[in-house]
Amino acid sequence: MTLPPSAGPVIELEHVSFSLNGRPLLDDLTLSVDRGQTLVLLGRSGSGKTTTLKLINGLRLPTRGQVRVGGRRTTEWDPIRLRRGIGYVIQDGGLFPHFTVERNIALVPRIEGWDRERVQARVRELLALVGLDAELASRYPSELSGGQRQRVGVARALAAEPPILILDEAFGALDPITRSEMQKEFRALQQRMRKAVVFVTHDLREALLLADRIALMEEGRLIVNLSAEEFTRSNHPLVRAHMEAFSGPMDSR
Amino acid sequence: MNFWHFMISNRQQVVELTVEHITLAGISTLIAAIVGIPLGILITRIPKLSKPILGSANVIQTIPSLALFGFLIPAPWIGDRASRLAILALALYGLLPLIRNTYAGIRNVDPALVEAGRAMGLTDRQLLFQIELPLASGVIVAGVRIAAVLSIGLATIAAAIGAGGLGEFIFRGLAMVNNQVILAGAVPAALLALAADFLLGVLERRLNLLRLKS
């Protein structure tokens, strides 16, 4: 996917509602993400964060309202083309267990018909980018640690140079130390890559570390959409509840 | 004359009938796979068809094998040669394990992986051939194993309609009230079934390792 050079938002959701089998999952959601911006969708389980991601990559289509990616509605995109332009990272990497690290990373470039040398060069480049030894290329996902799998997952999402990256609880399965490492590295990576990133998490600390903007969701609705700094100062009761849930026990110690 | 004497003095016929038996069971299992695996894939794509297709394959299994051979005799072309008829009947029995295991194998692939593949922009075909079938291959081979063992066992009955195979010894021995002759058919047939079970079992475990690597 190549984006038009215009300065407009890369991802736009306009009054989007989504119901599944008559059950409303999202209600009147309006959001936008610019190039180089990281939007964190924060909220508890079932608040509609993952559904929002699926609306962006066209795995779901809005019941009402519209979702535009690169200026075009997702209903007008060829879903295959749309998705190949959106890198997708899930918890524990979501790697295919029957593929080596190399094949996992190379999957989209290969089906996009890149020639062999270009694919190999890209795999090496990506392994270095996510801080993995080139020797790991021939291993299977089961032979990696959780942190390594997650790095491969990020490398795979970046493989075909998508302008958009979406991450669903990407670092949720990692131990706290690895998790914090990954968060810092991801932030550094994003500062260089300047992609449009949507990051789903229920971890406030992660949200504050990574976000340019934080969209707090609850029961399918957008509660607030603030910069990370504004978020910490907000007096909205639900924002305070989130802040207290994280900082409370620390302060009392 | 004991069993070993019989086997040695009739070794040429033992070999011939064993080869016939392997041919009957092998071709019928192959046909069952060629038909059953695509049907199994089909019902994962069109779930509405799963009940009628699995149901029909189930009904076929309940038909007693001798009766099924009998039913097929009037079929044109197929009924002309006993071996064709036997192969068709055996293939029909092999359908259920293959359809069922293909279906179950694909359905049991971790939905998160399928969703990840779809989110990465894989087409339905790429998803099937690169993700779902490889990850289901162990379960599908288990279906082939069940069909092959079933077919080797049932192929002994094919001799009743003159299709040959090790069943010839069994029926001859029954007619002669001679246990040695019965055993000359039954023992090699049992060994064949065990060998098929073992070899396909090894393949199945290897393929399952792929899946468990996650």
Image: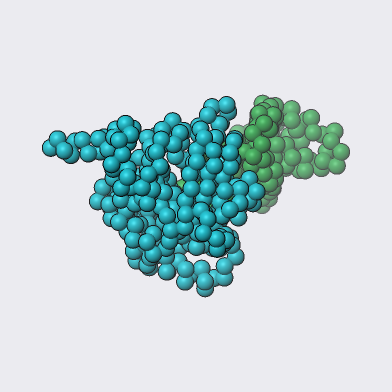
Chain colours: A cyan, B green
Residue at coordinates 61% horizontally, 48% vertically from top-left? A73
Q: Is residue A146 left or right of residue A12?
A: left
* Front residue (pair A63, B22): A63
Q: Is residue B144 above or below residue A95?
A: above
Residue B117, percent from left and from top: 53, 50
Q: Report the label total.
A: 0
Q: Can you give x and y, in whole percent of width and height, for residue A1 in the image?
A: 57, 59
Q: In the rendered view of the protein, which quadrant contains the C terminus of chain A? A: top left
- Is A11 above or below relative to A124? above
Q: Is residue A249 visible?
A: yes
Question: Which one is nearer the viewer's eye here, B143 or B187?
Answer: B143
Q: State the image coordinates of residue B179 (x, y, percent, origin top left).
A: 60, 34
Question: Foreground: B188 or B201?
Answer: B201
Residue B2 in which image quadrant: top right
Looking at the picture, how far across and down is residue A122, in whole percent? 47, 68
Which residue is pictured at 38% across the width and 48% down the height? A213
Q: Is residue A89 above or below residue A217?
A: below
Judged left or right of residue A114, residue B75 is right
Q: Residue at x 41, y 33 (%)?
A: A218
Q: Is residue A3 left or right of A99 when viewed as pictured? A: right
Q: Residue furthest right?
A: B76
Report whether A174 appears left or right of A68.
Answer: left
Q: Please say whether residue B200 is visible from this viewpoint.
A: no
- Which residue does the image show at 18% across and 39% down from the upper left? A250
> Furthest residue to the bottom?
A117
